[in-house]
Image: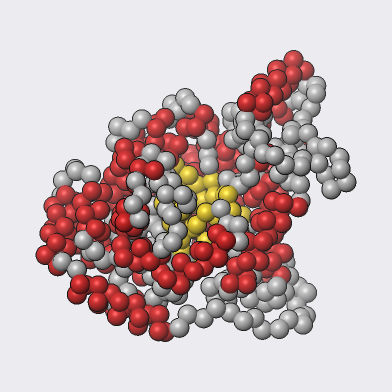
Amino acid sequence: MDEAGTQAGRERWAKRFAAAPGRDADFSTLSGVEVEPLYGPDGADDRFERIGWPGEFPYTRGLHANGYRGRPWTIRQFAGFGNATQTNERYKMILGAGGGGLSVAFDMPTLMGRDSDDPRSLGEVGHCGVAIDSAADMDALFAGIPLGETTTSMTISGPAVPVFCMYLVAAQRQGVDIGTLNGTLQTDIFKEYIAQKEWLFPPEPHLRLIGDLMEYCAAKIPAYKPLSVSGYHIREAGSTAAQELAFTLADGFGYVELGLSRGLDIETFAPGLSFFFDSHIDFFEEIAKFRAARRIWARWMRDVYGAKTAKAQWLRFHTQTAGVSLTAQQPQNNVVRTAVEALAAVLGGTNSLHTNALDEVLALPSENAAQTALRTQQVIMEETGVVNVADPLGGSWYVEALTDEMERQAEEIFTRIRDMGSDGTMTSGLLRGIEDGWFSAEIADSAFEYQQKLEKGDKKVVGVNVHTSSIEEPLEILRISHEVESDQRELLTRRRADRDEAAVRATLDRMVEVAGTEENMVPAMLDAAVAEATLGEICGALRDVWGSYTEPPRF
């Protein structure tokens, strides 16, 4: 870009910056040096042709002209354990300590669409998250927390739609107009087949439900984001950064194609898509990954799918620090790892962030460990000065080269996925890759290669294969009592006895009837949730209609 082009770009940015809301804060260094909101060249610089300016297409440098000067990222701590009442107490602690939003972790039976008294739930109730069997549990989960004023993210995909309906019922019982709700539902079923393996049905019925949810939210709950496309679980399964980036964005393109196939306006539904990335320990690689993600998404949305407005081109994303990077050996080191990963997410421009607790590799976080994880974000936000400048690493030769390399590798993977399909669409390629086990094999190969490097000592992890001497003391960890499961099962039995069984059966029958048509499934499922049909009953009825799914073997 020549000098005139650089100057014109700076002037455009200055106008947007002046129009953007700002915070009343001290934007100076610790020594009192006033900090400019943006740094870049005054003269010609070829890099600016590619990376642009903050708040300007292709959004490599961020969605907003003023970066975090206008609004810092949302501190959204992921939490859930035991029963709904216990988790409600943790949520109140998080909000009281300065958390900006809630993120719900569900236990394994809930993630698999099973009730707590299902024989397959034995020993799992409340252990990796909170147990939710019906709308009554949602009432308890958010008791005393006004849902009309709190943004809530729910990390669940297979049974996402019935769980969302229970959340709507809880909001209605609080007297909240559901049309005003704001939050995010994960719902991303592609990544389940690719990495996490928590599906309920074959892919097509799941996509039908997701399409219904997109339509419902677009019409009824415009601020709510019905899809959070998740790369986190892909990375945790062992993928490389480039695979996480490419597989996640490819999934997102598949959902864009789903929305377009439903006749939805891309300018309306695309802003309701959000993303969820892992922030791993390789500091600069992660920053480059986030910057490349924004640029790729904006370009594809504009050039491939025809989105014209900025909000339809924006990639908004939540980040969680890498659980897989934490170690059981010398667990206090995990505080350092989490801080580095959180800083990478912030310098990469995340919109919200969860920081893992030091003891998560051993158990669900204790209250003290959860508070330390929260304080990690607050120290970064309040003390380090990284919020003062938009994209402070923009223009770094290293960061820009890594960003370009991330984009190059991702584009190669996109081409391969599309070529696998029958009609050149991303959706067709995704489905074929899932059916053939290609995604699982690619991740497995990457995970195996890393493990070999770790065992040979080529990759070093402090406390594991280097600097292993330790003076640590055993941690006091959170243990879930077996009484949680027995109490939850008894509570579920009482609720079934107290509900109107005829109403439950009628709503389930109606839901099954709708499943055989092209009618939107959400209203019928919402009626079942109002009647206190359980999650297992709702999902079981649909399994009877749609069948189950078995992953193809891959050797």
Q: Is residue 110 above or below residue 45?
A: below
The quadrant of the image that shows the N terminus is top right
Which residue: 74% across, 34% down?
37
The quadrant of the image that shows the C terminus is bottom left
Residue at the limit of the structure toward the right, as seen here: 31
Residue at the limit of the structure toward the top, as seen here: 4
Between residues 249 and 243, which one lies in front from this camera angle? 249
Between residues 339 and 555, which one lies in front from this camera angle? 339
Task: Using residue 408 as the reference point, say whether residue 300 is left or right of it.
Answer: left
Between residues 449 and 153, which one lies in front from this camera angle? 153
Instruction: Give how far across and how far down residue 534 sits, in percent.
Output: 26, 66
Q: Is residue 486 above or below residue 508?
A: below
The image quadrant of residue 157 is: bottom left
Task: Using residue 63 as the reference point, say whether residue 204 is left or right of it.
Answer: left
Which residue: 20% across, 72% down?
498
Which residue: 43% across, 55% down?
146
Instruction: Give how far across and how far down residue 516 sits, in percent.
Output: 15, 50
What colouring style does the render use? secondary structure
Task: Using residue 42 as the reference point, say whether residue 289 is left or right of it.
Answer: left
The image quadrant of residue 66 is: top right
